[in-house]
Amino acid sequence: MFSYKKFEELCNENNVTAYQVSNVTGVATSTLSMWKKGKYVPKINKIQKLAEFFNVPISYFLKGDDTGE
């Protein structure tokens, strides 16, 4: 399961906003918002874009859950 919490943590660590990530990766802010609300599960190609932006493996976003496990 995709962990939006991990996305937020990476944004904080890298001093970027979701809006800035959206502009660089092409993943719409509305899409990010839906992920945050749990309304949609991201497709692997979009997770790949985030992973490339933050220079982390795709698995980083898939480990654990939003409770921090």
Image (cartoon, rainbow, N blue to C red):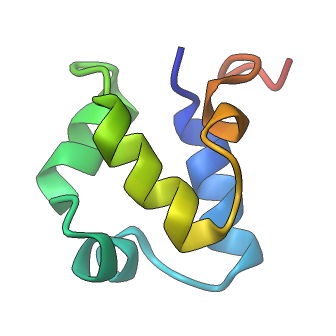
Q: Percent x, y for residue 30? A: 13, 51
Residue at 33% across / 20% down in the picture?
38
Q: Percent x, y for residue 67? A: 75, 19
Q: In this view, does 21 lie above or below 6?
A: below
Q: Percent x, y for residue 10? A: 68, 62
In which quadrant will I find the C terminus? top right
Is residue 51 rendered to the left or right of residue 17?
A: right
Residue at 23% across / 21% down in the picture?
40
Residue at 31% across / 41% down in the picture?
45
Q: In this view, does 46 lie above or below 52?
A: above
Residue at 72% across / 39% down in the picture?
60
Is residue 20 rendered to the left or right of residue 2?
A: left
Q: How many labels does the image show?
A: 0
Q: Percent x, y for residue 8? A: 59, 55
Q: Is residue 69 above or below residue 20?
A: above
Is residue 21 rendered to the left or right of residue 12?
A: left
In which quadrant will I find the N terminus? top right
The furthest residue to the right: 69
Is residue 57 rendered to the left or right of residue 52?
A: right
Nearest the eye: 16 or 27: 27
Nearest the eye: 56 or 68: 56
Q: In which quarter of the image is residue 14?
A: bottom right
Q: In which quarter of the image is residue 63?
A: top right
